[in-house]
Image (cartoon, rainbow, N blue to C red):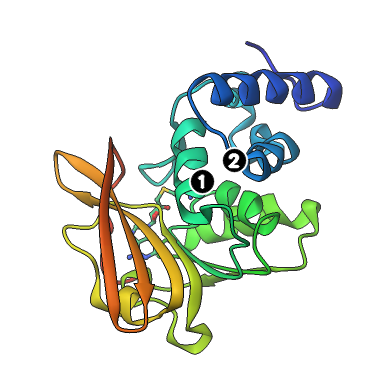
Amino acid sequence: MSVRASDPGQASRARARMVERLRAQGIRDERVLAAMQAVPRHAFVDEGLAFSAYDDTPLPIGFQQTISQPFVVARMLELLRNGRELGRTLEVGAGCGYQAAVLSLLATEVYAVERIRGLLDRARANLRPLRLPNVRLKLADGSLGLPEAAPFDSIVVAAAAVGLPPALKEQLASGGRLIIPVGGAEQRLLLIERQGNTFRETWCEAVRFVPLIAGTD
Ligand code: SAH
């Protein structure tokens, strides 16, 4: 499917087809689907890749990183939401900023952290024209969470960890939900629900993410 950034009507139709495909793939959360219909995904990838922006595939965003495929973004946000407002939300691994833009339509506040400075600059540039008042970007090692903004009602991690970083668990508010890909060659989404000091873990579908790496560039 070919999308020209200069043709908003065409991009919007490509997004509508993407949303229909997500529905057919089993995504039921209408708020997530509406947010993904609204955010211009093609504006977050290189112009030369815009024609593939609405295909169900991950795409390179530079610095050996990728923007997740639409189904995985939708599924993670559906699991994270579970029908509720996301509230104060932490995204670890802002990448090109696409998921942060989708989150901004579902959450009261979004704190998106990224460890690669060049990508953070790209995310800022991509997000600026959208004028989303509730998104804050920060250069940080997200495996340490973001203590100055904690606790979070929702935490979504966009890179695969070997195990759940303790700081993320600690920075989750009571009643909050956290979703993170865990594993190496084989990865699965892990959903954590916190009630007081009880953490319920649920393993969900198999996924493939770039690794969560400590430190910043
Ligand atoms: N959500 C992104 C996709 C991100 S790909 C989007 O919509 O484009 C995963 C990102 O996680 C990469 O940009 C990578 O640099 C970042 N990352 C990996 N380890 C990290 C860490 N410890 N802290 C913050 N970001 C991290």
Which residue is labeled 2 in the image? 29
For the residue marked with disc 1, what is the amino acid?
Glu
C-alpha gap between disc 2 and disc 1: 6 Å
The residue carrying mark 2 has its beta carbon less than 8 Å from ligand 1: no
Question: Residue beneath label 1, please?
Answer: 78
Label whose residue precedes the other's in the sequence (2 or 1): 2
Question: Residue 183: percent from the left, percent from the top?
Answer: 17, 49
Q: Is the C-beta separation of discs 2 and 1 under 8 Å?
A: yes
The numbered dot on residue 201 is none
Image quadrant assignment for residue 178: bottom left
The correct choice, above or below, for 49 with respect to 123 in the image is above
* Furthest-bottom residue in this view: 148
Task: Write down the quadrant of residue 48 in the picture.
Answer: top right
Q: Quadrant of the N terminus?
A: top right
For label 1, the SS is helix
State the image quarter where residue 195 is shown: bottom left
Q: Position of residue 206 (x, y in %)?
A: 26, 36
Q: Amino acid at mark 2?
A: Asp
In the foreground, 120 or 80: 80
Coordinates of residue 164 in the picture (x, y in percent): 23, 65
Image quarter in which the C terminus is found = bottom left
Q: Is residue 169 above or below residue 85?
A: below
Residue 205 shown left or right of residue 115 in the figure: left
What crowding class fits label 2: few (fewer than 14 Cα within 10 Å), some (14-19), or many (20 or more)? Answer: some
